[in-house]
Amino acid sequence: PTDAPTNATTPTDAPTEPPVDFCDSEMVAGDSGFSVGELSVNCDIQPDEPNVNYACSVDNADAFDCDFPLTLALSTYPAGNHILRVRATDPATGITTTQEIPFSVPDLTVRFINDSPAVSGSNVTVYVETNRPADSITCQLYYPPRSNGVSVTVNCTETKMATFYGVDGDPRIRVFARIRPFERARTVTTLWVHPGVCTTHLINDRIVVDGDTANIEFAGTVPGTTFRCRLDRKPWFDCTTRLKIPNLSYGIHKLKIRPSGADCALALPRTFSFTILN
């Protein structure tokens, strides 16, 4: 037909592809810059079209309806790298586009607030804070950090007090922490506790050996101190400042003496060596 159109034209109101990057994001540090903080996201794919529908998902989790600005608490995700996916759908045109926003969550961190714990009599008090909220963490504090040491399980909070009794010579406190249910237990940090001035010394600076018997006389630097002693690898026992040990075998022996009174909670044992020649 002579009246057939010679040229096809594109309608001026045809839908156009949306931009690839339509979201801005930033990491917001937590209190004092120590806690893991938040991921803040703001998306606006079509500023002139308020009816765009948004759905969000993290990694392979189910999608959820999301509004902006959107804030994700990083403490709710395990340590490592993650991807936030934002899907925008224009109901008028049916066009859907997705932007991926990578973010990372740092490892669990626990730190001692003070380098030196408070000491009162036989009690040692330490203050601990973590970069996760209290309801997601279990902490164990060990003093000393050995299999036969004191272990206390606590809920780590922004400021946590833990008190230990019966310090046994090792001047360290270690924290093991675990995020439920994501991460395994791990050693996070170690605090060295200074033993102070409570110690022992030998009278006349020597141990008197008579045949197979050792005669030890010693004193403590703090009046009224009680003592615990250990010969070689035998168990610890209560001892006085005048100690007689008979029936010893030939060779070199080691005697450890540790103050154990209320004012000597952080005292380390001292080791004294002597030799039986018979």
Image (tube, grey):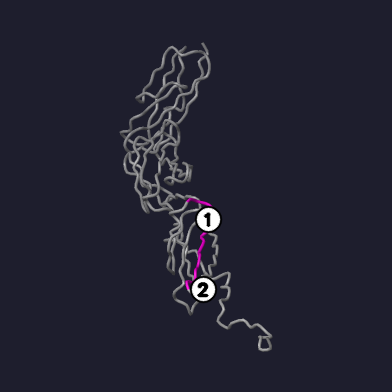
SS type, badge 2: loop
At which x and y percent is residue 274?
Answer: 50, 21
Left or right of 159 on screen, residue 252: right
Quadrant position of the N terminus in the picture: bottom right
Which of 181/198 is in front? Answer: 181
Seen in the picture, residue 120 relative to 166 is either above or below; the reply is below
Place residue 65 in its image quadrant: bottom left
What residue did someone put label 2 on?
Answer: 93
Seen in the picture, residue 266 relative to 61 is either above or below; the reply is above
Q: Identity of the amino acid at label 2?
A: Thr
Identify the residue shown where x is 49% and y is 13%. Answer: 249
Judged by depth in the image, the label closer to the viewer, 2 or 1, is 2
Q: Earlier in the sequence, mark 2 or mark 1?
A: 1
Residue 82 marker? 1
Would you say residue 89 sits in the magenta stretch?
yes
Which of 203/171 is in front? Answer: 171
Q: Which residues are magenta?
A: 78-91
Would you say residue 41 sits in the magenta stretch?
no
Q: Identity of the amino acid at label 1?
A: His
